[in-house]
Amino acid sequence: MTIVASKAQIDADDALDWVSVCKLADIEKNTGVCAEFNGEQVAIFHLYSDALASKSDVKAVSNFDPFAQANVLSRGLITEKDANFHIASPLLKQEFCLESGQCLQDEAVAIPTYQARINQGIVELREGK
């Protein structure tokens, strides 16, 4: 037997997984903030560039810098290379891909990533990628 959910059911089920964190307007363009999500510090970045057709996007990764052993990544520098966005640690300058969490300088190191979206002007997160 195959069960087919209506679009409304899928949207309702999908909404249950997402957690509202803040208004997009609370995060300046091309900066980050730290938020607590499921007991973890998460760095949320508001991206805005020509590579995104001058539209806003949000990315979320762990706020913990494994090299500096400190929760600082939300204060890092956002970089863009070949339409890929990275965060450079404000302390030791290692860069992490905002999609995969992979460190550019040490491929043996990656940080956790989170699903993030903008829903009617609200930034929402959920576990996993």
Image: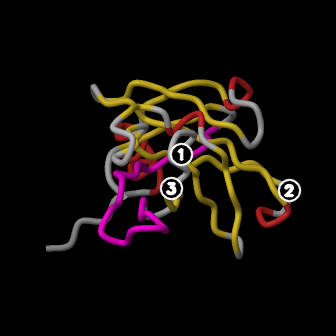
Whether residue 102 is in magenta: the answer is: yes
Q: Check disc 3 and report the residue beneath it.
A: 94
Name the N-terminal-most of marks 2 and 1: 2
Image quarter in which the N terminus is found: bottom left
Mark nearest the camera among 2 and 3 is: 3
Q: Position of residue 12 (x, y in %)?
A: 41, 42
Which amino acid does the dot numbered 3 rest on?
Answer: Gln
Name the N-terminal-most of marks 2 and 3: 2
- Magenta span covers which residues? 101-119
Seen in the picture, residue 48 relative to 69 is either above or below; the reply is below
What residue is drawn where x is 69% and y is 29%?
27
Q: Check disc 2 and report the residue beneath it.
A: 54
Seen in the picture, residue 14 relative to 64 is either above or below; the reply is below
Whether residue 48 is in magenta: the answer is: no
Q: Position of residue 96 (x, y in %)?
A: 49, 58
Q: Check disc 1 and report the residue beneath it.
A: 89
Q: How many residues crowd around disc 1 within 10 Å: few (fewer than 14), some, or many (20 or more)?
A: many
Q: How many residues crowd around disc 2 within 10 Å: few (fewer than 14), some, or many (20 or more)?
A: few
Q: Position of residue 17 (x, y in %)?
A: 35, 41
What residue is drawn where x is 78% and y is 50%?
48
Which amino acid does the dot numbered 1 rest on?
Answer: Ser
Which amino acid does the dot numbered 2 rest on?
Answer: Ser
| Label 2 with label 3: CB-CB less than 8 Å | no
